[in-house]
Amino acid sequence: MAGKTARNKGHNYERKIRREFIEMGFTDCNTSRFESLKLDTEKVDLCNTGCFNIQCKAVEIGINYNKLLSEMPKGEKYNVVFHKKSNAKKLQY
């Protein structure tokens, strides 16, 4: 996927998850690109999400979750990764 297209896909996914957090009552939720450059550089995509640091990934390739989580802030908040994989095979039960 071309760089600009991949970047837009990631930003769109962040905004989708942001809207879901707002619907759940986190009305001050915002993207770190808008709210906090410091959090953005610490691999946190959403701000004002209570006790969670949120990272959103919309990629088709595998993710090294251990590495990603180790790059996120350590502290009192839970580090959470949302991963959307569009072209994944659907599981049938």
Image (cartoon, rainbow, N blue to C red):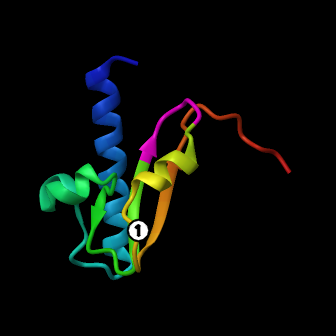
Along the line of sight, the residue nearer the viewer: 89 or 54: 54
Q: Is residue 52 magenta?
A: no
Of residues 55 and 84, the one drawn nearer to the viewer in this rendering: 55
Q: Residues within 10 Å of mark 1 (few under 14, many from 20)?
A: few
Q: Secondary structure at mark 1?
A: loop
Q: Position of residue 82 (x, y in %)?
A: 49, 55
Question: Predominant secondary structure in magenta?
Answer: loop
**Which residue is at the front of the view, 20 or 11?**
11
Give the quadrant of residue 85.
top right
Say which amino acid is labelled 1.
Answer: Lys
Image quarter of the N terminus: top left
Q: Is residue 47 above or below residue 59?
A: below
Image height of 84 relative to 35, above or below = above
The image shows a total of numbered marks equal to 1
Query: Could you say which quadrant of the image residue 27 lies in?
Result: bottom left
Tell me if residue 40 comes above or below residue 86 in the rendering. Answer: below
Please report the residue visible at 31 percent of the width from the left and 73 percent of the height from the top: 22
* Residue 34 in picture, x, y percent from top left: 13, 56
- Residue at 35% x, 55% y is 16
- Residue at the spot 18% in from the left edge and 52% down from the top edge: 33
Q: Which residue is mark 1?
A: 74
Q: Residue at x 35, y 74 (%)?
A: 23
Residue interval drawn in magenta = 57-62
Q: Position of residue 63 (x, y in %)?
A: 55, 39
**Image vertical order of residue 78 relative to residue 54, above or below:** below
Q: Is residue 14 left or right of residue 70?
A: left
Q: Residue furthest top?
A: 2
